[in-house]
Amino acid sequence: MAESDLPAQTVCEIVQRHGGTPTRLLQILRDVQDHLTWLSPETLDRVAEELHISPAKVRGVAEFYSFLYTAPRGSYDLLFSDNITDRMLGNRELLHYLCERLGVEVGKTRVDGVVTVGTTSCTGMCDQGPAALVNGYALTRLDKPRLNRIAELVNGQIPLAQWPCEFFEVISNIRRADILLGRHFADGSALRAVLKRGPEAILEEMVKSGLRGQGGAGFKSAAKWISCRNAPGEVKYVVCNADEGEPGTFKDRVLMQDFADLVFEGMTLCGRVIGARQGFVYLRGEYRYLLPSLQAHLQRRREVGLLGKAILGDPTFGFDIDIHLGAGAYVCGEESALIESLEGKHGVPRIRPPFPTTHGYLNQPTVVNNVETFAAAAKIAVEGGAWFASRGTAESKGTKLLSLSGDCERPGIYEYPFGVTVRRVLEDCGALDAQGIQMAGPAGHMISARQFDRRICFEDLATGGSFMVFSHRRDILDGVRNFAHFFVHESCGFCTPCRVGTSLLRDLVTKMHTGHGTRYDLEEMRKLGRIMQVACHCGLGQTAPNPVLDSLEQFPEAWERRLRSTAFEPAFDLDAALEQARQLTGRSDPDAYLREEELILGAMP
Amino acid sequence: MSEPKVKIATCSLAGCFGCHMSLLDLDERLFELAERVELDRSPLTDIKELGNCDLGLIEGGVCNAENVHVLMEFRAHCKVLVAIGACALNGGVPAMRNQYDLKECLEESYLRGIGLVNPQIPNDPEIPLLLNQVHPLHEVVKIDYFLPGCPPSADAIWTFVNQLLSGQPLALPYTQIHYD
């Protein structure tokens, strides 16, 4: 066989392995890229041909996801996590240090094609950063000695399998356990409960429990399950949203690492209750290191009769779980975008209603729940709704896992009954000098010390679990700017208010941050933020201005000390914008400059 | 004596004069306008020095050093400054060069163009120096109002100017500012 046919052969084999199913497109492209390091136009055309779908569709998917590359990439692809918590731990210095050691520019592939070093959104290792990914596998606790070693390994082209395993060690850091993490759970007990008592009785317990969506939106889980159970349709699906992309959140990673059986049990339970036989876990690409252990758990469950065709020996109880790996798209955490992605498309949120409970995966009734929600549901089936509801507040029952990171002595996972005050959490994690908290991630809310007595629950401060602490030695605007960049990168580009709005907001925040902003710009940011809140298609765009709007309200001093005293200041450096033309023409006459002292800058009649 | 007339100045920066043509499309309404306003600096008067004005209408974006000076002069002399048309609002067609390096643009035009004699990048000091990108007006000065369109129709300009001069709240009919 000619060498040039190798890629074609690889593509063919991979497509066959996935059954030639177009809904597996994202998984197919991931696998192809693992073999070929990037997706060339020829490769993509080949995939389209094998799947009998249009090349444009394949290209559209390949270009949508951050971890799919349509330009050559190094055989070692290093991506530094660039969340604000990584920045607090000095990731920028390390990034440039490694680039220098490897003789490579940020974001560019080295001439020999061996290595690329870039940045990516939060990889969910905030309690053990600075973090990075190498060929998709998580690296934690980076420091200069570790990077020296990594540079040697890369230059020596040592396979990842031979890298020191401590580089890839991910620790769970469970600091406080309550009913979810603290109590023993016997595998299969929830499934025995549903077989013994029937789906209606379990649903009653779910209603009694008051369990709400733990991803942060807080929709009543029982209502979702009932709606899906009652929806017409022969084939139904259960989807576990493990696309934990909100910067600063990592509790789902810990659940999938240490409590995978509990989560799978919750999914299987849901399958029985709503009448589904197929479940999917949508695992974010950043957590691909978990894949082998999760597959092993699934296999073991099949072997002991907790998954498969006849669960617990009951031939009417069939359910299996498949794991889909994401590829670096925050928007896929939104349930309808996640379903699109599961179907092998690019992840653009659908118009809702109809909701997934009636029109979900392949337009069939589908329950999409967060990892933590499924884990809680399994416990409720065994221990009862009243047991669960005995904790928490009137509207928020049970407990919540918080992912703590930033300026605190003991970052990690804390499980609290709903209703706990921010102050209590800060005391427990050793955040003695907090000036503010980014609650529920960039899409959530920024609160200042004046609000530390607020309670974490749906009635007051709702959260999916992200809790990033900013001490007094931090500049709040560093965080706001980091989040503004994050939203620009993660906007799916479908609707104009979000696609354009996030960029405009980033430009204004940068202008302010670098000391060129005026009151006019502050007002522009407020206006823009309000437009985005009402005009964007999905939650991503609607919440993208939150860090700006919240910090304007909670930390006005952080903005005001940067204000220029003029009424208006241009958005860019006027004279610097002439530099290129000066060089091209060789001109140095007075008209070749726009010197500030000669301009009527900010002049108003 | 009748009321003093409102002073208006207009200019086209990196635009195509299409918005000015639209202004001329006011046709017979121009007579009515002329009774209430006096034109200061404008391509229609050829007055070179800008005086103090009530209203400045600007079409086109900002593509060179001269545009920056003119725009700032307008801002300093006009009580109310209005960006008119797509280029003034967003950069428009001239801003399509923003995706290329300025070097590439100039080389394409002046060094590699078909049929060029003595190819060279012009460097005469009389020619305004190009900015590396084309910008909308509001990135250089504060703009009070934005009138979209490519160009805004004469009707839209008429509604806008009338409402502004008479102090009414601005409210343009859907058909005058939407193009779907």
Image (tube, coloured by chain):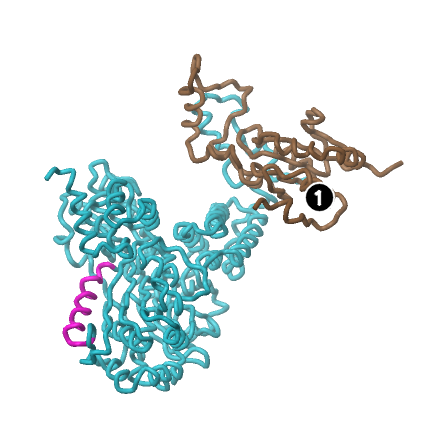
Chain colours: A cyan, B brown
Residue at (20, 73) in percent of width and height:
A309
In the image, the segment drawn in magenta is A288-306
The number of numbered discs placed on residues in the rendered structure image is: 1
The one nearer the camera, A297 or A524, is A297
The one nearer the camera, A211 or A269, is A269
- Read off the residue under disc 1: B159
The N terminus of chain A appears in which quarter of the rendering? top left
The one nearer the camera, A87 or A215, is A215
The C terminus of chain A appears in which quarter of the rendering? top right
Residue A387 is a magenta residue: no
- Residue B83 location in percent, x, y? 62, 39
Placement of A235 over or under A15, stated as above or below: below
Please tell me in which quadrant of the rendered image residue A398 appears. Answer: bottom left
Q: Chain of mark 1?
A: B
Secondary structure under tag 1 reads helix
Q: Residue furthest top?
A: B118
Residue A296 is a magenta residue: yes
Within-10-Å neighbours for mark 1: few <14, some 14–19, many 20+:
some
- Residue A436 location in percent, x, y? 44, 63
Kind of residue at disc 1 = Thr
Placement of A395 over or under B41, stated as above or below: below
- Residue A51 location in percent, x, y? 25, 50
Please tell me in which quadrant of the rendered image residue B27 appears. Answer: top right
- Residue A410 location in percent, x, y? 31, 67
Residue at (64, 37) in percent of width and height:
B75
